[in-house]
């Protein structure tokens, strides 16, 4: 193709061109149109065109770069040709060879942001397929929904794990199992909360403050750092339903959730819950049969 247009490399007059912005035109189509970096540049270009009333040049060039015709120029620099009031897209090489002035720092940032977006988009597609193949489509739905439920962290944890899958491309069998458990907890949340509310309603109130024999099930344990050292605390549900929190006595060292215990301790009621309190100075502690192994 013999070119006679004024934008061919040999006819370019750099002083007639004004830099406008940057574009990304992938060969697979406009797949990154919603990326912030792309949206920002397109807004800049639209505003410039609105001021000038100009349009893209219609000369024959054969590719994305309207100067050399390079069809592989995904990232391009857009210039406004003032004499003809048209816009000309150039690949970076042509823009540099033609000594066209543009903000190179902004160009590098645009390229970097678009490359990151492309990798992220590819990572998301792979992650969605991976979760689907593992029977965990619900995990992807939770990630996309991006909804946090006050008082619950299952959705937050799933989003964090899926984000790592997008970034690194894979999860361990243990992580897949953990996600399945989290999904199960989300899907049974309503029933669990209702059961917990019924349990709380049926629970007896805490006895009067003082020394009391506490017999029940360990609901949870937690290592707590204090100014006086590190201690393991436990939450115990008495056989009649009320609950108490306090330091694990030495005789119950290593106690686990689900185990049955008995000990004597001093009780102090909570200020806002008649069925919850705190225990201190535990003694005569022992494990009871019938707890979880």
Image (tube, helix red, strand yellow):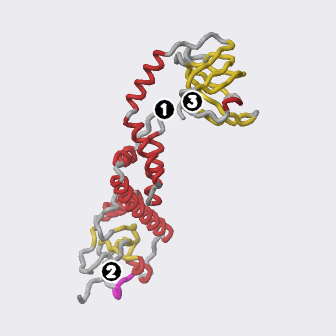
Q: Secondary structure at mark 3?
A: loop
Residue at position x 62%, y 25% from top? 245
Q: Is residue 198 magenta?
A: no
The residue indicated by pointer 1 is 151
Instruction: Report x, y in % for residue 6.
Output: 30, 83
Relative to the observer, which residue lies in front, 144 or 230? 230
Q: Which tag, 3 or 1, sits closer to the chain's start? A: 1
Give the residue furthest to the right.
228
Secondary structure mostly seen in the magenta stretch: helix
Q: In the rendered view of the protein, which quadrant contains the C terminus?
A: top right
Give the residue furthest to the top.
208
**Residue contact at pointers 1 and 2, CB within 8 angstroms:** no
Q: Secondary structure at mark 2?
A: loop
Which of the 4 image quarters holds residue 256?
Answer: top right
Tell which tag, 1 or 2, sits nearer the viewer: 1
The numbered disc on residue 259 is 3
Give the residue furthest to the front.
289
Q: Which residues are magenta?
A: 9-13
The numbered disc on residue 70 is 2
Residue at position x 35%, y 63% from top? 45
* Whether residue 77 is situated above or below residue 247 in the rendered picture: below
Tell which tag, 2 or 3, sits nearer the viewer: 3
Q: Residues within 10 Å of mark 1 (few under 14, many from 20)?
A: few
Residue 68 visible (yes or no): yes
Relative to the observer, which residue lies in front, 68 or 244? 244
Distance of mark 2 from mark 3, alpha carbons? 72 Å
Residue 43 visible (yes or no): no
Relative to the observer, which residue lies in front, 96 or 178? 178
Q: Is residue 12 magenta?
A: yes
Distance of mark 3 from mark 1, alpha carbons? 26 Å
* Whether residue 146 is situated above or below residue 29 in the rendered picture: above
Q: Residues within 10 Å of mark 2 (few under 14, many from 20)?
A: some
């Amino acid at each position: 193709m013999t070119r006679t247009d004024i934008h061919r490399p040999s006819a370019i007059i750099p002083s007639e061109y004004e830099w406008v912005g940057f574009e990304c035109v992938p060969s697979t189509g406009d797949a990154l149109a919603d990326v912030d970096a792309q949206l920002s540049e397109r807004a800049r270009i639209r505003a410039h065109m609105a001021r000038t009333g100009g349009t893209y040049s219609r000369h024959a060039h054969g590719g994305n770069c309207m100067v050399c015709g390079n069809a592989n120029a995904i990232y391009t620099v857009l210039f406004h040709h003032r004499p003809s009031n048209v816009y000309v897209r150039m690949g970076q090489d042509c823009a540099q060879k033609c000594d066209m002035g543009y903000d190179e720092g902004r160009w590098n940032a645009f390229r970097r942001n678009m490359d990151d977006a492309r990798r992220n988009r590819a990572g998301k597609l792979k992650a969605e397929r991976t979760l689907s193949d593992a029977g965990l489509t619900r995990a992807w739905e939770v990630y996309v929904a991006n909804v946090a439920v006050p008082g619950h962290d299952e959705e937050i944890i799933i989003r964090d794990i899926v984000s790592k899958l997008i970034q690194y491309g894979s999860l361990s069998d243990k992580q897949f199992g953990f996600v399945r458990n989290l999904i199960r907890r989300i899907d049974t949340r309503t029933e669990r909360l209702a059961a917990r509310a019924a349990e709380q309603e049926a629970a007896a109130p805490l006895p009067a403050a003082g020394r009391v024999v506490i017999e029940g099930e360990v609901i949870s344990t937690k290592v707590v750092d204090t100014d006086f050292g590190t201690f393991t605390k436990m939450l115990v549900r008495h056989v009649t339903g009320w609950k108490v929190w306090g330091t694990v006595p030495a005789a119950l060292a290593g106690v686990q959730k689900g185990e049955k215990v008995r000990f004597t301790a001093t009780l102090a009621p909570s200020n806002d819950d008649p069925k919850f309190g705190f225990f201190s100075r535990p003694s005569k502690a022992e494990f009871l049969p019938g707890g979880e192994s």
